[in-house]
Amino acid sequence: MNDGGNSSLTDKCGNCGGTENLMKCTRCSTAAYCSKKCQLAQWPEHKLICKMASKMASKTASAKNELDAIGAMYKTVLKEGVNTVKLISTHAGCFSSDEKETPAGVPDNFICIHEASVKFAMLGEEKRMYGEHEYKKVFDELVENEHVWLEFFAHFLNHTHAGDCAMVLQPLTKIYYDRGDYEACGQVLEMLAKVLYYCKIHATRVGEDRFTEFCKWTEYGANKTWYEMNLILKQHAKNVPLFRKLCQVEMAHGQNELLYKRWRKMYKKCKSLDNLSDAMILKVIKAHSLEFEAVKADSARVQLHECGLCKKKETSLGEFMNCSRCKNVAYCGRECQKKHWKIHKSNCNAAPGRK
């Protein structure tokens, strides 16, 4: 055992409740005991928690950021078969994530946001597009019951849920943008703006820098997507107010190599963005449009796949499973994969495979 710490979980013996000569469990450090006898006595009860905590510690230690750490914890918990029921707090009271009915004032399908945010955290940054099904489910629910949801988000006590909603809508905009579905991308961006409106209002009351920063950079990302999409569609006039907003954020955070650099290069004598007329900014945007090329290097990763046999198309990314051997052909189910094997087997290792 290790020396005891100041944690509320280790300020007394996990078996007898004593407070002297405490030593932490060397494996997980989540429990303390006053003697070897007490540790052995509580081991049958403590061993599951001990195993889980030590696994979580090793998984989260290698995480790149906080979201990846949360995702690693969720994966560990689900792998061990532990119940992940969560107590959810809202303006209408608390309820469990496994309850079939929500309290009055809470949208009927509220749980879809909880499921999408869990999926978002579990996937990690590089594979976040594979949560498209869950993200789209949230978006479809918002469209169908927009008034109910926005009324729910308007309550200050629901600000974290509004934040979760904005968090899962953002990757959906990127999926549609990379796929070239600009109409769908625009629809999600419009909904994201409505949710962010309440997030920003609540941010002034919450007083947490992290939530304020989340709102600011989520809005910046959404505006940047709008801007680039308008460049592609040659809708330059729409980009004038977006150009101003993006430049203001960039200048405030020293990111002068982006849009800020463009107008400074064209109008060297003009030291302030406020001194630029809309016509002058429009000229900068048109110049940018001539050299702008939408980055499509990863577009193949977000394209929907067809079943190799029946040609049915998946409705969201990751719905179909690729051939586990070559990763080059997708199937809507096991039955189609079996029927197609006679045709596919000769080419199974012919190509390097999709990631």
Image (tube, rainbow, N blue to C red):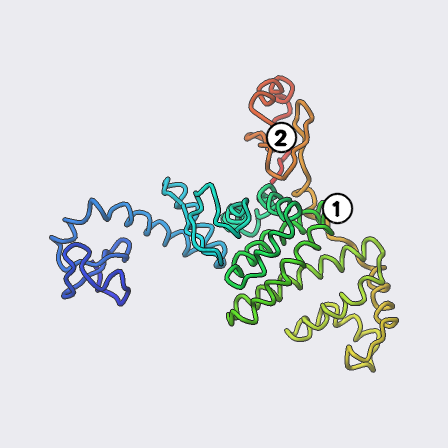
Q: How far from the left and from the top, in percent, is residue 124? A: 53, 50
- Point out which mark residue 180 bears: 1
Q: Residues within 10 Å of mark 1 (few under 14, many from 20)?
A: some
Q: Residue at x 84, y 57 (%)?
A: 235
CA distance separating discs 1 and 2: 21 Å
Task: Tell me if 305 is positioned left or right of 111 in this view.
Answer: right
Q: Is residue 310 above or below residue 231?
A: above
Residue named by callout 2: 330
- Among all residues in the image, which is located at the extreme left? 37
Instruction: Tell me which label, 1 or 2, sits earlier in the chain.
Output: 1
Secondary element at image label 2: strand
- Point out which mark residue 269 bears: none
Q: How far from the left and from the top, in percent, is residue 347? A: 64, 25
Secondary element at image label 1: loop
Q: Residue at x 81, y 66 (%)?
A: 240
Task: Tell me if 331 is positioned left or right of 20 in this view.
Answer: right
Three-letter code for the amino acid on which mark 2 is drawn: Ala
Q: Front-most of 71 and 114? A: 114
Q: Is residue 86 above or below residue 9?
A: above
Q: How far from the left and from the top, in percent, is residue 238? A: 82, 61
Three-letter code for the amino acid on which mark 1 is drawn: Gly
Q: How far from the left and from the top, in percent, is residue 92? A: 48, 55
Q: Front-most of 241 and 47? A: 241
Q: Front-most of 173 and 324? A: 173
Q: Which quarter of the figure is the N terminus placed in?
A: bottom left
Q: Is residue 292 visible?
A: yes
Q: Residue at x 15, y 49 (%)?
A: 40
